[in-house]
Image (tube, helix red, strand yellow):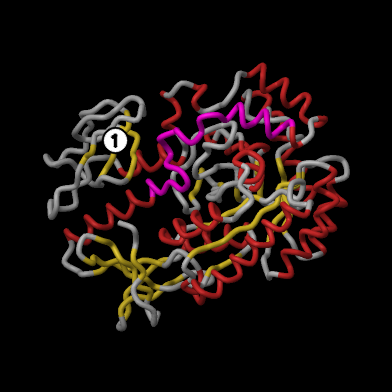
Amino acid sequence: MFQDDSGAATTTADEGFFTYDGDAVCYGRPFRGNTAKYLNGDPLPDLAMEPHSGPRLPLDLSEVVTNLRRERYRRIRPRAEFVAGSSSVRNLYYAVRPVLGVAIRKHLQRLRLAGWNAIPFPRWPVDASVDTLMRSAMKLALRAGDAPRIPFIWFWPDGADAGVMMTHDVEGERGLKYCDALMTLDESFGIPSSFQIVPTSGAADVCAAIQRRGFEVNLHDWNHDGRLFRDKRLFLKRAELINAQARRLGCRGFRSAVMYREQDWFDALEFDYDMSVPNVAHLDPQRGGCCTVMPYFVGDILELPLTTIQDYSLLHVIGDYSIALWRRQIELILAEHGLISFIVHPDYVNTKRENAVYVELLAHLDRVRAQRKLWIAAPGDIEQWWRQRDAMRLVPDDRGWRVVGDELCRACVAYAALDGDRVVYEIEGAREAPLASRC
């Protein structure tokens, strides 16, 4: 464990916000320095890293990372900052939502989400505070150690630069009718994808049809009324029903409606992975975000965070019918070698103009896959790889290091090293130049 300058792992500051090394926004109790209780646009206290000071972080790395991933920084903020609109207004909205057209809904949502682009944290359009902080810790270890580089198991199989995950949340009858066409479109670009289905009475037939075509099926909440995480007792009751449906339909993954979430309750869900946590949630009714572009464990469940803007938010809230924002997010996540994950709804891309935007996105992903060696996989495959990687170990041998564990044939040994003040990565046996991080 990293310690403070006196060698004691004790906190002296109040719990709050601060930055570390000038870039990573943190929340917790540092061992030294000051914190800010609220984010109000003023510069945060910066616990600057002193060059060559040895392996001493002025914070509890595990605590700060967990606070960010689990969105625990929301505890001390006004609730209205994180859930747009009052409870009564939300109840009314979801009661009449099924009969509202898209034009009316997007107008109401623009009003409800007003000011989203002025929210200071998490940082829009991609927040990598967790990943930056982890890399800063690696920088300290490299400076303090005798070896010029530190080995680790590369993030993705076969040395891929990043992982990509395409998912489709099906909200209603209109979306169900378009699933078949959407599968054909994804197949034409060689893009595996998953469909999240609300477990209605006809869900079994829909799921079976999607699975027969080789696509993945996951559960999408219970009934899409936005109330799953409103009350703990209601959640536990519905969790039992959701788990039963997942067993019946053979679904291993879950996503809540409208990305509502309470990560501390996830242990009641019997899934291998969840996909309900955005990286930056400025354009979601429940704001916040996990501040990482990497998968992470919430207890036994692996969280596969949403790291790009949803199609509905892009097209109907912002009103942008280009893929410029998606392209920018893809490049930012690629720089972190993270998970590039999408939600595209069959309910909203089944008209000519919206469909053309999605086709442009698929074509762009296909080009980047060829240029940058992306690993595009279904959520279940990504979850299985991440668990296998977590169980793998590095052991020394007469040639350096080797990986032991399941699926080790796809694993690559990589090395972190310093290039001036930056951490760079090199994959063993790779012919390309070392992969530079943003740190």
Q: Is residue 148 depicted above or below 301 in this figure? A: below
Residue 106 among magenta residues? yes
Image side of residue 57 versus residue 133, left or right: left
Q: Residue at x 25, y 69 (%)?
A: 149
Tell me where the magenta segment starts and ends, as one range. 104-130
Mark 1 residue type: Phe
Toward the viewer: 408 or 76? 76
Image side of residue 124 versus residue 385, left or right: left
Q: Residue at x 55, y 29 (%)?
A: 114
For label 1, the crowd category at 10 Å Cα-Cα, with few meaning under 14, some 14 to 19 and many 20 or more, is many
Assign a secondary structure to mark 1.
strand
Q: Is residue 120 depicted above or below 155 in this figure? A: above
- Read off the residue under disc 1: 18
State the image coordinates of residue 101 (x, y, percent, origin top left): 79, 34
Q: Is residue 187 depicted above or below 308 in this figure? A: below
Residue 56 among magenta residues? no
State the image coordinates of residue 407 (x, y, percent, origin top left): 53, 71
Residue 138 appears in which quarter of the rendering? bottom left
Image side of residue 324 versus residue 230, left or right: left
Q: Residue at x 73, y 56 (%)?
A: 355
Residue 302 visible within the image: no
Toward the viewer: 360 or 259? 360
